Amino acid sequence: ELKKTEKKQERSNEIRAALNAYTDALSFSSDKYLLNVDKATKKSMVREDRLPDVKQVITSDMGMRYLYRNQVLTAMDDVKAEMKYQHDSPTKEWTDLLDLLQTAEEAMQRWLSLIDAADVKDA
């Protein structure tokens, strides 16, 4: 049921569909991951048996992707609402729209930060 709901939402939202298409195409190694911490922290984690297992890493990664995706979607919904408001308003004040667009761009940059920079450039 959740997948049906998501697909229905994708049909009405191109941004959601695009971000989901990328995320759905990801594949993860089931036996290894890259730990991005400094050497001292890594040594401490190994000594204290605090290294996360692969499932935890994948779950965390996907959680961050969906969190950032939802931030992008919310920001763009706010942009659309503000554009409609300004279109219908007799006096035009674009400051709020510009702020909302900045918020949307920052959210998108967070989502893109989870992708290898070379892949982003190629896209």
Image (tube, rainbow, N blue to C red):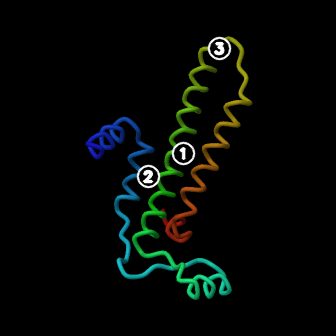
Q: Residue at position x 28%, y 46% from top?
A: 3
Image position of 101 (left or right of 80): right
What's the distance in space between the residues labelled 3 and 1, CA to CA?
A: 25 Å
- Name the residue nearer the viewer: 10 or 84: 10
What's the distance in space between the residues labelled 1 and 2, CA to CA?
A: 10 Å
Residue at the disc numbered 1: 72
In the image, residue 80 lies at what x, y percent?
55, 30
Residue at the disc numbered 2: 19
Q: Residue at position x 74%, y 30% from top?
A: 95
- Name the residue nearer the viewer: 102 or 34: 34
> For the residue labelled by badge 1, is the local secondary structure a helix, a strand or a loop?
helix
> What amino acid type is highlighted by mark number 1?
Val
Image position of 115 (left or right of 16): right
- Name the residue nearer the viewer: 121 or 73: 73
Task: Tell me, yes or no, whether the two marked residues, 3 and 2, touch with CB atoms within 8 Å.
Answer: no
Image position of 74 (left or right of 97): left
> What amino acid type is highlighted by mark number 3?
Ser
Disc number for residue 89: 3
In the image, residue 45 lies at what x, y percent?
59, 82
